[in-house]
Image (spheres, helix red, strand yellow):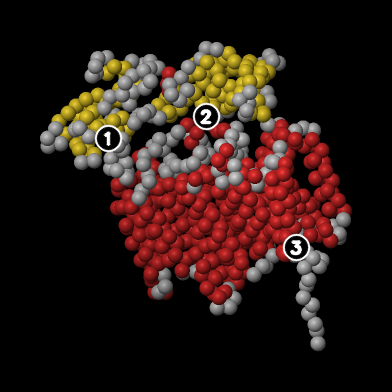
Amino acid sequence: MNWEYFIWFAIPSIICWIGASVLVYNTKFKLLSNLLFILGISIFLLFIILFWSSIQRPPFRTIGETRLWYSFFITTTGYITYRIWKYKWILSYTSLVAVVFIIINLLKPEIHSTNLMPALQSYWFIPHVTSYILSYSMLGAATIASFILLRHVEKNENEKKLEDLIDNLVYVGFGFLLLGMLMGCMWAKEAWGNYWSWDPKETWAFLTSTTYLIYIHTRIHKLNIKISLWILIIAIIFLSITWLGINYLPSAQDSIHVY
Amino acid sequence: MMRREKRKIWQLPWSYKESLIIVFGIIIVGFSLQTIIGGFNFYLLIYPFNLYLGIIILIFILLSLIFQKNAFFKWLTSLHLSTSLLIAITLLSLILGLTKQDNGAINSEDVNIFYHLGFNQMTSSWAFVFIYFLILLSLGAIIAKRKPSFTKKYTIFLLNHLGLWIILFFAGLGYADTKRYIMYVNVGEIEWRVFDKENRVQELPIAIQLNKFTIEEYIPKLAIVNKKTSEILPKDKPEYFQIDTNNKKEISFNGYKIKLIDYIHNAVRSSDSTFKEVPMKASTPAAFVQVKTQKIDKTKWVSAGNSIQFPMVLDIDSSLAIVMTPAEPKSFISNIEVYTKEGTNVKAELRVNHPLKVGKWKIYQYGYDNNMGKMSSYSSFELVYDPWLNIVYVGIALLGLGSLLLIIFGINYKK
């Protein structure tokens, strides 16, 4: 099983997810849409498992591999959020994001079989990256919801339930973000003897988390919701730079996190 | 009729406007100070001066608790100030994330306004240090003020805020007390001299003897290069062929049929064009490869070579050739013996990600002679002494537990 087979798993998953996202709006097909969505996630997970077992190293090394996990986690997050909060659009939008990342992976895999250098051979590797990608998925879902809420706010509509959903996704996503960062600290200490060294990736991860903290504190303060939602949008931009943009920043050319 | 008076700026209690003005005023003072006297020297905070400053911070927090009705302390523990400080630290970090940081070495052409403002050494600029200090005061006072209770809300608040405060307090104030040195030890020799950050030689009360140094390498890959441009094909999406000794089938690669006939991981040249297995340090991976098209059918040994053995390539035609990628290290292990002045003697196998603790020191596998690879005659170690590490770990543990509870309860943490 190698990357060339990806398309044969990706397309069925995409079809399942898109089918489920459309059918979910029709109450007659509720069960079918649920089953389709889970089937899509299962097919995708099957590829990850087969891919992992064949490359003989954890698939967390390249940007393309992190996008693979992102597609898996954001659909899973979307499904769980849908089941708890009953918002149908969350299924559609998380599917859309997953499909975009799958298409990027099909067109520009960036998944070159890289050997694990000694510094990456650590038990912190998998939990550190997983925690981050999970967090990115939830914060991505929160951003989708914040765009929807912004539209309601423009129309002066009160959507308390949607506000709660966003807060919930941000709290849980932020928890994973912090956990990922702390595990990174422990790992860095073991590998380099330094738990924090303001490496560009660390700096950007830090300012991403402080931006989410600003959101959380403005929400506690019940500041104008519009300001809070815009902070979320700034935060996801910082998050994207941390995750995908570091490789292109001139200030980060010596970073140990460029891959 | 009720007349609602509009609140004037600077009228108590202070709100966002005043908080932001004060915080950014402090940043401006910091930048001004920076242009006049240069950056903040963290080594001023070496023990016991960090202890004094720590006590001052704690006394200040105690005062904030005693005089919590006072308007200033009310403001210091307000959400307005917390949020303003978060905005300030985010913006300063943004500068830090966008500016290339240096460790003192600077070219004259890089000396510009941003250099004088300390952008290139952000974490030791006065503005950053002031905000950091203010966060310690404000966060500390906020934790002290909150009435303890056995609720979910208070527990999560305490774990997250206290955890962060402990990390910031001990990592910041303890920074000057940490020592880190690099030690280079030749194979078979014993060494106690180290280099500090400024490359000055120091003698430590700890000595390391390097008995053996071994590097294990990954099996390399093959690629097709354009000999004139040294670009790997296909041009914008270089492709590599991973050598797999279990799979010697012919495969199509870049439009050529190539086949692995033989592979030797520890190979040494036995004639002009052949290799044999010799398990010695100067050995290098070599592969016997066949390449076929309708016109050609060639077989040859290919090797990336090393500093002793020449590289070998398989010329497909006048412009293209099959090459082997340089071997990448899988692991490097130093067999060491550590001696301390107190008389302890520890034997260990040191690897990356597996440091060794000896007394107050932690020893890390740092590097080796990259140009020589397996033939490196030395191994280098980093020796780190951090007296405040354990208490920082306590902070990390509290914060970790706090974030775990945040994940479990989500929005319900307030209930």
Between A244 and A152, the residue placed more toward the observer is A244
Instruction: Determine the residue positioned at 79% across, 65% down.
Output: B10
Q: Which residue is mark 1?
A: B228
Extreme residue toward the front, this view: B109
Instruction: Determine the residue positioned at 44% across, 65% down.
Output: A93
Q: Secondary structure at mark 1?
A: loop
What amino acid type should be assigned to the residue bearing mark 3?
A: Glu
Q: Disc 3 versus disc 2: distance between alpha carbons?
A: 50 Å
Q: Secondary structure at mark 3?
A: helix
Asked if B16 appears above or below B200 in the picture, the reply is: below
Q: Earlier in the sequence, mark 2 or mark 1?
A: 1
Q: Disc 1 versus disc 3: distance between alpha carbons?
A: 65 Å
What amino acid type should be assigned to the residue bearing mark 1?
A: Lys
Q: Earlier in the sequence, mark 3 or mark 2?
A: 3
To which chain does the residue with label 1 belong?
B
Q: Which residue is mark 2?
A: B352
**Looking at the figure, which quarter contains the N terminus of chain A?**
top left
Q: Which residue is mark 3?
A: B18
Q: Nearer the viewer, mark 2 or mark 1?
A: 1
Regarding residue A14, the answer to whether it shows in the image is yes
Regarding residue B388, the answer to whether it shows in the image is no
A46 left or right, relative to B10: left
Extreme residue toward the left, this view: B295
